Image (cartoon, helix red, strand yellow):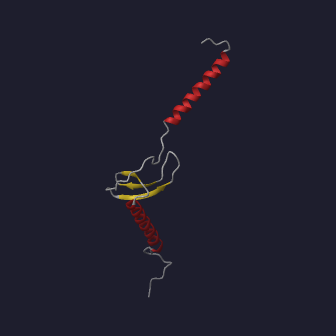
């Protein structure tokens, strides 16, 4: 291909390169979310959980934190809901216990009869 206007050719070349770079970048983007879920019950110790809402390519999921790493689970599974609500209830209990705990040496609380 012969180019009669060097600046126009350079501009077109630059545009083509930037489009190619953008396209490649979009295809290689890493998503930190669940794009697939498992229905299999987790055998590792669960230490936490969070809800993920659908926002393509991410799907609806409960993400369990285990001692072995994160697991994306199907939110409609009975065992998933049960495990999630048990964790939530334990978390709420811990918060309420921490809020009512009297620290040793706390002079603002009268503990004498």
Classify 37 as above or below 107. Answer: above
Residue visible at 51% across and 51% down? Answer: 54
Residue visible at 48% across and 50% down? Answer: 59
Which residue is the extreme one toward the left? 43
Query: How many numbered badges does the structure rendering display?
Result: 0
Q: Is residue 66 left or right of residue 2?
A: left
Which residue is the extreme one toward the bottom? 113
Residue visible at 51% across and 78% down? Answer: 108
Residue visible at 44% across and 85% down? Answer: 112
Image location of residue 97, percent across then percent down: 44, 72
Quadrant where the N terminus is found in the figure: top right
Quadrant where the C terminus is found in the figure: bottom left
Image location of residue 91, percent across then percent down: 44, 66
Along the viewing direction, whichever of 60 and 95 lies nearer the viewer: 60
Image location of residue 40, percent across then percent down: 35, 54
Could you say which quadrant of the image residue 6 lies in? top right
Along the viewing direction, whichever of 11 and 54 lies nearer the viewer: 54
Could you say which quadrant of the image residue 48 lies in? bottom left
Q: Is residue 14 left or right of residue 36?
A: right
Image location of residue 7, percent across then percent down: 67, 18
């Amino acid at each position: 291909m012969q180019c009669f206007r060097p600046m126009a050719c350079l501009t077109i070349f630059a545009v083509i390169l930037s489009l190619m770079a953008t396209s490649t970048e979009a295809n290689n983007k890493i998503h930190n979310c669940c794009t697939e879920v498992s229905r299999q019950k987790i055998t590792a110790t669960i230490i936490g959980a969070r809800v993920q809402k659908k926002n393509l390519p991410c799907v609806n999921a409960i993400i369990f934190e285990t001692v072995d790493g994160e697991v994306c689970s199907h939110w409609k599974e009975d065992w998933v809901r049960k495990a999630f609500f048990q964790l939530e209830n334990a978390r709420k209990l811990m918060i309420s216990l921490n809020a009512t705990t009297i620290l040793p040496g706390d002079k603002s609380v009268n503990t004498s009869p």
